[in-house]
Image (cartoon, helix red, strand yellow):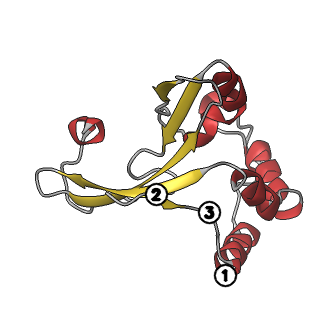
Amino acid sequence: MAIAPFKISISDIELELLRQKLELARLPTNNVKWREDNGVPPELIHDTVQFWLKTYDWRAEEARLNELPQFKTPIEVDDGFGTLDIHFVHSTSSVADATPLLFLHGWPGSFMEIIKGLPLLNRAGFHVVAPSLPGYGFSSYTDKAGFDIRQHAE
Protein backbone atom coordinates (compact mmCIF):
# COMPACT_ATOMS: atom_id res chain seq x y z
CA MET A 1 0.00 0.00 0.00
CA ALA A 2 1.74 3.16 -1.25
CA ILE A 3 0.98 6.39 0.56
CA ALA A 4 1.74 9.48 -1.52
CA PRO A 5 1.66 13.17 -0.59
CA PHE A 6 -1.27 15.04 -2.10
CA LYS A 7 -1.86 18.69 -2.94
CA ILE A 8 -5.14 20.11 -4.21
CA SER A 9 -4.71 21.57 -7.67
CA ILE A 10 -7.92 22.44 -9.51
CA SER A 11 -7.16 23.46 -13.09
CA ASP A 12 -7.86 26.97 -14.35
CA ILE A 13 -10.03 25.36 -17.03
CA GLU A 14 -12.30 23.79 -14.37
CA LEU A 15 -12.57 27.08 -12.48
CA GLU A 16 -13.42 28.94 -15.68
CA LEU A 17 -16.08 26.35 -16.50
CA LEU A 18 -17.60 26.83 -13.04
CA ARG A 19 -17.60 30.61 -13.52
CA GLN A 20 -19.35 30.23 -16.89
CA LYS A 21 -21.99 27.92 -15.41
CA LEU A 22 -22.64 30.36 -12.58
CA GLU A 23 -23.00 33.24 -15.03
CA LEU A 24 -25.42 31.20 -17.14
CA ALA A 25 -27.52 30.01 -14.20
CA ARG A 26 -31.22 30.64 -14.79
CA LEU A 27 -32.65 31.41 -11.40
CA PRO A 28 -36.34 31.63 -10.52
CA THR A 29 -37.89 35.06 -10.60
CA ASN A 30 -39.31 36.70 -7.51
CA ASN A 31 -42.80 36.87 -9.02
CA VAL A 32 -43.94 34.14 -6.67
CA LYS A 33 -43.86 34.52 -2.90
CA TRP A 34 -41.49 31.70 -2.05
CA ARG A 35 -40.82 30.93 1.57
CA GLU A 36 -38.27 28.65 3.19
CA ASP A 37 -40.89 25.96 3.81
CA ASN A 38 -41.08 25.67 -0.02
CA GLY A 39 -37.33 25.12 -0.22
CA VAL A 40 -34.34 27.40 -0.57
CA PRO A 41 -35.54 30.97 -1.22
CA PRO A 42 -34.52 32.36 -4.63
CA GLU A 43 -32.85 35.34 -2.93
CA LEU A 44 -30.47 33.00 -1.11
CA ILE A 45 -29.62 31.16 -4.33
CA HIS A 46 -29.05 34.48 -6.10
CA ASP A 47 -26.83 35.77 -3.27
CA THR A 48 -24.86 32.51 -3.22
CA VAL A 49 -24.25 32.62 -6.98
CA GLN A 50 -23.14 36.27 -6.71
CA PHE A 51 -20.83 35.41 -3.81
CA TRP A 52 -19.18 32.65 -5.84
CA LEU A 53 -18.86 34.92 -8.87
CA LYS A 54 -17.63 38.10 -7.21
CA THR A 55 -16.24 37.36 -3.75
CA TYR A 56 -15.15 33.75 -3.24
CA ASP A 57 -11.47 33.12 -3.93
CA TRP A 58 -10.92 29.44 -4.65
CA ARG A 59 -7.17 29.85 -5.04
CA ALA A 60 -6.93 31.31 -1.51
CA GLU A 61 -9.00 28.42 -0.15
CA GLU A 62 -6.91 25.91 -2.09
CA ALA A 63 -3.72 27.40 -0.62
CA ARG A 64 -5.20 27.26 2.90
CA LEU A 65 -6.20 23.61 2.46
CA ASN A 66 -2.80 22.75 1.01
CA GLU A 67 -1.20 23.81 4.29
CA LEU A 68 -2.65 20.59 5.72
CA PRO A 69 -0.59 17.38 5.54
CA GLN A 70 -2.60 15.53 2.88
CA PHE A 71 -2.05 12.15 1.29
CA LYS A 72 -3.66 9.55 -0.96
CA THR A 73 -3.40 5.79 -0.75
CA PRO A 74 -4.93 2.98 -2.83
CA ILE A 75 -7.23 0.68 -0.88
CA GLU A 76 -8.51 -2.58 -2.37
CA VAL A 77 -12.20 -3.17 -1.63
CA ASP A 78 -13.52 -6.73 -1.57
CA ASP A 79 -16.44 -8.09 -3.63
CA GLY A 80 -15.12 -6.76 -6.93
CA PHE A 81 -15.36 -3.05 -6.11
CA GLY A 82 -11.75 -2.55 -7.13
CA THR A 83 -9.10 -0.23 -5.81
CA LEU A 84 -10.12 3.18 -4.54
CA ASP A 85 -7.71 6.07 -4.11
CA ILE A 86 -8.51 7.42 -0.66
CA HIS A 87 -7.55 10.96 0.28
CA PHE A 88 -6.77 11.79 3.90
CA VAL A 89 -5.26 14.35 6.22
CA HIS A 90 -2.70 13.02 8.71
CA SER A 91 -1.89 15.58 11.38
CA THR A 92 0.62 14.36 13.93
CA SER A 93 1.08 15.37 17.55
CA SER A 94 4.45 16.27 19.06
CA VAL A 95 3.36 14.58 22.30
CA ALA A 96 5.33 11.41 23.06
CA ASP A 97 3.17 8.27 22.79
CA ALA A 98 0.32 10.20 21.14
CA THR A 99 -2.90 8.26 20.57
CA PRO A 100 -4.13 7.72 16.99
CA LEU A 101 -7.59 9.19 16.36
CA LEU A 102 -9.64 8.41 13.25
CA PHE A 103 -12.06 11.21 12.34
CA LEU A 104 -14.80 10.24 9.88
CA HIS A 105 -16.87 13.05 8.46
CA GLY A 106 -20.64 12.99 8.20
CA TRP A 107 -22.94 13.09 5.21
CA PRO A 108 -22.76 15.36 3.45
CA GLY A 109 -19.42 16.48 4.69
CA SER A 110 -15.70 16.39 4.21
CA PHE A 111 -12.35 16.22 5.92
CA MET A 112 -12.65 19.99 6.35
CA GLU A 113 -14.97 19.46 9.33
CA ILE A 114 -11.94 18.71 11.56
CA ILE A 115 -9.61 21.53 10.45
CA LYS A 116 -10.29 23.84 13.41
CA GLY A 117 -9.95 20.94 15.83
CA LEU A 118 -6.61 19.64 14.56
CA PRO A 119 -4.34 21.93 16.62
CA LEU A 120 -6.34 21.25 19.79
CA LEU A 121 -6.32 17.49 19.26
CA ASN A 122 -2.62 17.45 18.38
CA ARG A 123 -1.75 19.45 21.50
CA ALA A 124 -3.91 17.09 23.56
CA GLY A 125 -1.80 14.14 22.36
CA PHE A 126 -3.67 12.79 19.33
CA HIS A 127 -2.37 11.90 15.89
CA VAL A 128 -5.41 12.63 13.71
CA VAL A 129 -6.25 10.80 10.48
CA ALA A 130 -9.21 12.33 8.65
CA PRO A 131 -10.05 10.54 5.40
CA SER A 132 -12.40 11.69 2.70
CA LEU A 133 -14.94 8.89 2.45
CA PRO A 134 -15.16 7.14 -0.93
CA GLY A 135 -16.85 9.43 -3.41
CA TYR A 136 -16.28 12.56 -1.30
CA GLY A 137 -13.71 15.30 -1.62
CA PHE A 138 -10.64 13.93 -3.32
CA SER A 139 -11.33 10.20 -2.81
CA SER A 140 -12.37 8.10 -5.78
CA TYR A 141 -15.52 5.99 -5.97
CA THR A 142 -16.39 2.70 -7.58
CA ASP A 143 -18.50 2.45 -10.70
CA LYS A 144 -19.93 -0.89 -9.58
CA ALA A 145 -23.45 -0.86 -8.12
CA GLY A 146 -24.03 -2.03 -4.56
CA PHE A 147 -21.29 -0.13 -2.72
CA ASP A 148 -22.77 0.55 0.72
CA ILE A 149 -21.87 1.07 4.38
CA ARG A 150 -20.19 -2.33 4.61
CA GLN A 151 -17.65 -1.33 1.97
CA HIS A 152 -17.24 2.11 3.56
CA ALA A 153 -16.40 0.37 6.85
CA GLU A 154 -13.92 -1.93 5.14
Q: Which mark is residue 7?
A: 3
Q: Are marks 1 and 2 in contact (CB under 8 Å)?
A: no
Q: Residue furthest right?
A: 55
- Compared to residue 123, the image places residue 144 above or below, namely below
Disc on the earlier residue, 3 or 1: 3
Label 3: state its secondary structure. loop
61 left or right of 145 in image: right
Residue at the spot 57% in from the left edge and 52% down from the top edge: 70
Give amino acid for label 2: Lys
Residue 74 in picture, x, y percent from top left: 34, 59
Disc on the earlier residue, 1 or 2: 1
Residue at the spot 62% in from the left edge and 32% down from the top edge: 114
Residue 38 can be seen in this image: yes
Residue 39 can be seen in this image: no
Dot in front, 1 or 2: 2
Disc on the earlier residue, 3 or 2: 3
135 left or right of 112 in image: left
Label 2: state its secondary structure. strand
Disc tally is 3
- Compared to residue 47, the image places residue 119 above or below, namely above
Which residue in the structure is indicated by mark 2? Answer: 72
Label 1: state its secondary structure. helix
Measured in 3D between alpha carbons, the distance from the residue under mark 3 to the one under mark 1, in whole angstroms, is: 18 Å
